[in-house]
Each structure stands twice: as C-alpha cells, then as structure tokens.
Amino acid sequence: MDAKIIIAITEGGMSARFDSPQSILTGGGSHRQAPELLAALHAHHTLLVVDPYFASADFVSEIRLGLERQGIANEIFTDFQPDPTDQNVRTGAERFRAAGADSVLAIGGGSALDVAKMVAIASTNAGPLSQFQGYHRIPKPGPPLVAMPTTAGTGSEATKVAVITDTDRNVKMMILDAKLMPTAAIVDYELSMSMSKPLTAHVGVDALTHGIEAYVSRKANLLTDPVALSCITKIHANLRTAWTDPGNAQAREAMSLAALQGGLAFTNSSVCLVHGMSRPLGLLFRLPHGLSNSVLLPTVTRFSLPGSARRYAEVARAIGLASDRKSDDSACEALAEWLDQLNIDLQVPRLRDCCGGDVEKFRSVLPKMASDALDSGSPQNNPVVPAASQIVELFERAW
Ligand SMILES: [Fe+2]
C-alpha cells in the first residue's frame, strides 16, 4: 500500500514534493477508529508497539478488543527504551516475524513511533540498520503502519524519519526515507491529556522548533510554508494554556494538531541547526529529544536570525509579535525575546541544569558534539551554516 501523496509544483523554478500519511484521523475519541482502519488496510495480525507506560492503559485494551471484533489477531510489544536502539528494533522485528504479523499499530511518543517504523522496515529488509542511515537508503517498503501519538510534539506520526541509536558506534542514526511515512495517523488529543507539565513543555517547544526550522530552512517551499506557520501560530496561542491548565481540552487539541503540522512541515522541508546540535547532546547526556531541543532553541535562533531576517520576521508577524510597520530586525528581536520568555515561563531548565553542572566534562565533549552535529547534515540547512567552532560557542552560550 502506497502511503504517500506526492504533489509537485513549479513556481519561479522551484519544485516541491509533499509526503504525508494516506489518511489522517483527528478529534477526541478518534483512537476508537483504529481497528476499523486496520481492517480497511487488510490487516489479519497486528503487532501493537506500545510505550511501556501505556501497556495496561484502558484505551489500549479497548483497541485490542476492537481488533478482535474485527477478526484481527494482535499482540503487544513494549520491550524498548526511551531512546530506542538497534537492538530494540531487532527484538521487535523478531516478534513481528514469529507472530506472523502483517501490520503495525504504534502507540506512544516519538520513541514508540520511531521504533515501530523501524520494526516494520526491519521485517522486510534484512541486515544491520546502519545500512539505512542517511537519506533514501531503504530498499523495500514495510507492512502497513498506523501511528497514534500520545504526546503532542515529535510529529513522528506524519514524518518519514526515525532516529535510532546504533549501539556499536554510540551514534543516533537519522534515517530518512519516504518508506518510513506511516500509512495512517490517528491524532486523538485525549491521549495527550495525561502528559506531565515538563513533558508538555518540552515536546511543545520541540513542535515549535519543527515549525520554525521548517519555515527558515533552506529547503522550505511553498507547500510547507503555510503548514509551518499554522503550527507556530497554534503553539503561540495554546502552549502556555496547555501547560498551566493541563485539563484544557481546547488547548490540548490545538497542540496535538500543531505537532502533526510541525511533523508534516519539517519532513517535507527540513530541520536545521537546533536538531543538529540536539541529537549529540541528547545522546551524550541522556536528555530526551524534546528537552535537548528546548534548551537550545532560543540561543540557536538568535545566532541564526541574520541569515534569514525576512523569514524570521514573517514568523514574528504571523503570531502578532510585530506589526507590518516594524523593521525585520526589530521583528526578529521580538521573536528572540519571546522564545527566551517562553522557556522561562514553561520552566525549561538551562543546559547546565540538565547536564549535571560539570562544566569541565561538558567542555571535554564539545568538539565531538560539534562534529557529530555537522555530520548529521541538519546544520547545512540552517539560515546561517555554522563552522564547528561556532557550534562549540553556541553550546557554551546555552550552558
Ligand atoms: Fe524534533
């Protein structure tokens, strides 16, 4: 089943391609449609890849019951860690094959969704996962996969990316291929209502990073621009409310949709320097993805403003931080100030507070982190393409 929609446009010599799941279901309670959706995808045996936190949740039992009613056998796989590894994927793929499964239902945050995507791919492609690292290196598509996020952040339900740690090399591998795009996404904000305040903040700022980086990226295009701006606008209007009032359904719903849009935007444009620096930081200091992006976003944005003042100013104007009469430079300053204040308001810690406060240890790994960041390819899409020494300086500034 082909899970992608491709639209090519040409305007002023610029062409673009937009991939997305073939179906996206949204709305409170939409998780109940998972069994029907899998039946429509001709599933007979589904492997549920579920965040261990939700393994015994009522809604998961409800879905399994629904699958049985549809005549779809199913079993649950929860044997993976927050930053999933190649070994987690291997174990999941063995379970998939041993069960004779023909479809995957992923339930959880970015880690669950990423591991599920790679379990599906590993079930049809032999060999080590490292061979898929980079861009478009997966030979065969996997079985149908339905992705159901329980956080409002990564947007992994609508991206063609998975990040998996290679345990031999201790590297977070970025694997990007249209074959990783889920066949369908079910974005039910009700599943995100139990997120803690810190998690709401960190994944929310991660989604904001997706919107901003997709918009200012050198790969931004006419198809991704409106999606990115809509993502940013929703987060500006709702993240604080979702954080201060976790039971606010309207804010939670808006944040879930923003995260979905952030995923769609960056997967068809790109992420940039924040994500490039965030991956090695997360790996070496065991920081969750949302947190490592959140601590870097204000500092890296300030550094990047001169490379695309017009685009950053458009972001500031779209969310009402500056009027049309204000210069690009003052709109950029308003954006940078807002990002600083947002992190303060959401109690996002400083980098030193997440890394144990040992500045000498931190400094000793800066050259490796800078070189790993550059190797990921993401900084090359940034409005200002940094040298390794500038990345080191940015890590110091964020400390
Ligand atoms: Fe991200």
Image (cartoon, rainbow, N blue to C red):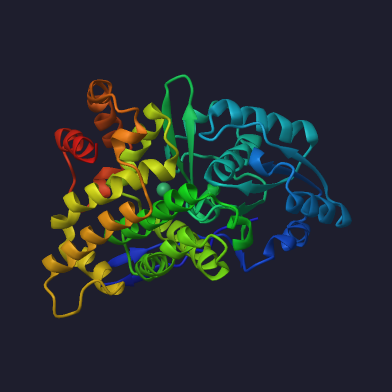
- x, y (%) of residue 133? 44, 34
Q: Where, quadrant-wise, is the N terminus in this rendering?
A: bottom right
Q: Position of residue 293 (x, y in %)?
A: 36, 45
Q: Is residue 183 above or below residue 284?
A: below
In the shown orientation, is residue 227 left or right of residue 303? right
Residue sitting farthest toward the bottom: 325
Residue 312 appears in view: yes
Side (left or right) of 114 relative to 60 = left
Residue 46, horizontal then vertical, whole percent: 76, 46
User: Seen in the image, is 397 located left or right of residue 285?
Assistant: left
Which quadrant: the C terminus?
A: top left
State which quadrant residue 220 falls in.
bottom left
Question: 31 or 357: nearer the eye?
Answer: 357
Residue 96 versus residue 274: which sits nearer the camera?
A: 274
Residue 53 locus on image (x, y percent): 65, 41
> Does the rendering let one see residue 269?
no
In the rendered image of this protein, does residue 231 appear above or below residue 298? below
The answer to which quarter of the image holds residue 379 is top left
* Residue depicted at x 31% and y 72%: 319
Q: Looking at the image, which residue is at 41% across and 60% down? A: 265
